[in-house]
Image (cartoon, helix red, strand yellow):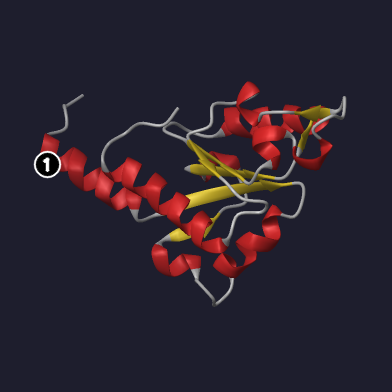
Amino acid sequence: MKKLTPKVIKSKNEARAWSVWVINYFTACGFMELLPWVGSGYDMERFGILAVPTPRHADVFIIAGYVTRKAAKRIKMIYDQMASPKYVLALGSCPMTGGMYWDSYATIKRVDEIIPVDLWIEGCPPKPENIGHGIVMAANAIKGGLEGH
């Protein structure tokens, strides 16, 4: 197989950066703050962001809300089905700390115990501007050639 030149690699990364396909996993209120991105408020498709129905086509995995032990199995399964390179964004305090269910036996305290997380976006829930900033940071990582997991 022929090796790609640096110019071709840079062009490939640039194209991938502005065609980010995401798959979402929401268990709580985090989706309410993501909704403006889907609607005309921010219009995510204008930025090249497209929600896909299958993990096999996704570049970015967005997780919001508290994660239970049962949900952890599904999150791991979705992550394993994604093609490399893949990026994971955790939205809000719930995937970071367990949220208001932090003391429950059924809640995973940190989602990075299950899968590696590339970007944590703080807030309870995070504002749409913060979510957009996180997605732009993921796109810049792709453009810069930083490989996800």
Work out whether 24 lies above or below 106.
below
Q: Which of 8 and 130 is in front in this view?
A: 130
Work out whether 134 lies above or below 97.
below
For the N terminus, the image quarter is top left
Q: Where is residue 49 in the image (x, y as percent from the top left)?
A: 46, 58
Q: Where is residue 148 in the image (x, y as percent from the top left)?
A: 41, 31
92 displayed left or right of 28: left
4 displayed left or right of 86: left
For the C terminus, the image quarter is top left
Report how many numbered discs are placed on residues in the image.
Answer: 1
Q: Which of 55 and 103 is in front in this view?
A: 103
Residue on which the image places disc 1: 7
Judge the density around disc 1: few (<14), some (14-19), many (≥20) Cα neighbours within 10 Å: few
Q: Where is residue 36 in the image (x, y as percent from the top left)?
A: 59, 69
As helix, strand or loop, the secondary structure at mark 1 comes to helix
21 displayed left or right of 91: left
Determine the residue positioned at 28% across, 45% down: 143
* Residue ranking furthest to the bottom: 40
Q: Position of residue 117 (x, y in %)?
A: 53, 32
Q: Which amino acid does label 1 sit on?
A: Lys
Work out whether 53 lies above or below 145.
below
Work out whether 76 lies above or below 122.
above
Residue 47, by quadrant, is: bottom left
Determine the residue positioned at 57% across, 53% down: 52
Q: Nearer the viewer, residue 2 or 90?
A: 90
Determine the residue positioned at 72% across, 28% down: 109
